[in-house]
Amino acid sequence: MMTALFIGMLIGVTVWWTLIQRLQDKPWTEHGVLEGSQDGLTSSAPKVGLWVFMAMASSLFLIFNSAYLMRVGFGHGSLESWVPLDEPPILWANTLVLILASVTMQLARGFAKKGDNRGVRTYFTAAGALSVLFLAGQLLAWQQLSATGEYGSSNPAYSFFILLTTVHGLHLIGGLWVMSRAAVKVWQNLDTTNVVALGSVRQSVQLCSTYWHFLLLVWFGLFTQFSIT
C-alpha cells in the first residue's frame, strides 16, 4: 500500500510540475524560434537525457522503497527484528534547507529567462551553498544516531536509513558537479548580450532547477517513509 502511495505521489507531482513549467513558458505566445538562439541550434537532447536519468533514478529509489517496506513487515526467522529509529530532529532542519535550495534554484531559473546572469550567479551560489549545508546536515544526522549507541549495523532500520540517505546524497553530489559546470558558463557570460550564450546559460539553469526539484521530491518521500515506519 505504501509503495503504491509513494509511486502515485511521485507521478502526480512530476506531472503537476511539468504542466506548471510548460505554462510558465507560455507556448501559446511563441511564433517561432529566434534566429541564432540556443533552441534553434540545439535539440532537446539534454532535457530528454535528464528526464531519462530521473526515471532511472526513480526506479532505483522505488526498488529500495519496496525492499524497505518488505523488511519492515518481516520480523521473524533468522533476521533481526525491525527496531524503528528515533529520527534526529535535524532532519526537519535539513528538509527546510533543501526546500530553500530548490526555491533559490527556481529563482535563478527566473533570472536566466530574463537574461540576467548576475541574478543567476547570486541565486545559483545560494542554491549550491544550501545544498552543501544539507549534505553536512545529513552527516550530522548519522553522527547523532551513532552517538546514541542504540543503533548499529545489526539494526535493519539503521542500515536502510544510511543506505537511502547515502544514495540520495550521491545523487545530490552528482548534481553539484553538473551545477559547477553550469556555473562556469554563468561566470563567463555575466554581461554578455550574445543570444547563443544566454540560451546556453538558460538551458543549463533550467536543467539544474528541474533536477533539484526532483531531488526535493525524492527526499520528501524518503523522509515521510522514515517518519511513519
Image: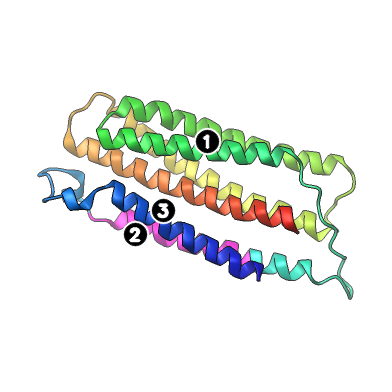
The three-letter amino acid code for the residue at tag 3 is Trp
The C terminus lies in which quarter of the figure? bottom right
Query: Which residue is denoted by mark 3 in the rendering?
Result: 17
Disc 1 marks a residue whose amino acid type is Leu
Q: Position of residue 61 (x, y in %)?
A: 59, 61
- Of tags 3 and 2, which is closer to the observer? 3
Nearest to the observer: residue 165 or residue 26: 26
Residue at 85%, 52% (x, y): give it: 152
Main SS of residues in magenta: helix
Left or right of 199: which side holds 169? right
Relative side of 172 to 84, left or right: left
| Mark-to-mark CA distance, 2 and 1 | 26 Å
- Per the image, the residue denoted by label 2 is 48
Choose top left, top right, bottom left or bottom right for residue 83: bottom right
Image point (30%, 46%), residue name: 24
Colour scheme of the rendered structure: rainbow
Query: Closer to us: mark 2 or mark 1?
Result: 1
Element under label 2? helix
Task: Report the residue marked by disc 1.
Answer: 100
> Magenta span has 44?
yes
Q: Position of residue 41 (x, y in %)?
A: 17, 49
Which quadrant of the view contains residue 205? top left
Q: Amino acid at mark 2?
A: Val
Spatial CA distance of label 3 from label 1 is 17 Å
Marks 3/2: CA distance?
Answer: 16 Å
